[in-house]
Image (cartoon, grey):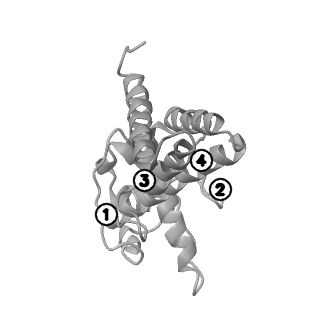
Amino acid sequence: MVTRAAPSDQRSRNARRSVAARGDGGRLREEILDAAIALVEELDDPWRLSLRAVAREVGVAATSIYLHFDSLESLLQAVKSRLWSRFGDEMVEADEQAGPNPFDRIVGFGRAYVRFAAEQPGAFRTLFATTWNLELPHGDSFVGESQFELIVDALAEVSSDREDAVRRATQLWCGLHGMVVLRTPLSRFP
């Protein structure tokens, strides 16, 4: 289960951060992004995130965030991109652990998908219940395509052709997603 990580230097929440050394702005950018992810994961609606809340969490002035992100929207896009990457890493890990058998790979993907949603509900909600216009990775035609293609590749081994594999992968993804959404605490779906 993923829990909220403490700030890297173990400072208390709302404490002022020490001034970064020259050339150490990348560290601050990562701290801002980590704080925004932690806060978004706690919120019912990621759009309730504010730059001031992120600044408080990191221990900097809100204006410091603008050195790394030109708006709340650009920060939220970075958050969602990082979460897609985290989700993708879990799907790849499931694929690697499953071995070559297509059935085992599909079961592994399904378990990874459901586990991600259960253990990281804020991240899952941010990925699938918000509409931020993300820049697509080079060559992708939709957000999450690389994760989807892992499933298509596994199903291609037991499908008549690529079109059939895409259709099966779509049905599987929709079924998994529907099951996860229906089994949220707000639902009484069995």
Tell me which label, 3 or 2, sits earlier in the chain: 2
Q: CA distance from mark 1 to mark 4?
A: 27 Å
Q: Amino acid at mark 3?
A: Gly
Tell me if mark 3 has few (under 14), some (14-19) or many (20+) residues whose alpha carbon lies within 10 angstroms of its own: some
Q: Earlier in the sequence, mark 4 or mark 3?
A: 4
Instruction: Name the residue carrying label 3.
Output: 144
Residue closer to the observer: 65 or 125: 125
Dot 4 falls on a residue whose secondary structure is helix
The picture quadrant where one finds residue 64 is bottom left
Cα gap from disc 1 to disc 3, whole angstroms = 22 Å
Q: Which residue is mark 2?
A: 10
C-alpha distance separating marks 4 and 2? 27 Å
Q: Residue at x 57, y 86 (%)?
A: 23
Q: Quadrant of the C terminus?
A: top left
Q: Give the percent coordinates (x, y) of residue 133.
A: 28, 60
For residue 129, side relative to residue 180 (left or right): left
Amino acid tagged 1: Leu
Secondary structure at numbered mark 1: helix
Residues under numbered marks 1 and 3 in contact, where contact means CB atoms less than 8 Å apart? no
Q: How far apart, in angstroms, are the residues tagged by discs 2 and 1?
A: 26 Å
Q: Secondary structure at mark 2?
A: loop
> Label 4 neighbourhood size at 10 Å, few (<14), some (14-19), many (20+)?
some
Confirm whether residue 72 shows in the render. Answer: yes
Counting from the top left corner in percent of width and height, residue 68 is at 42, 75
Q: Position of residue 117 (x, y in %)?
A: 49, 36
Q: In whole angstroms, how far apart are the C-alphas of marks 3 and 2?
A: 34 Å
Residue 72, numbered label: 1
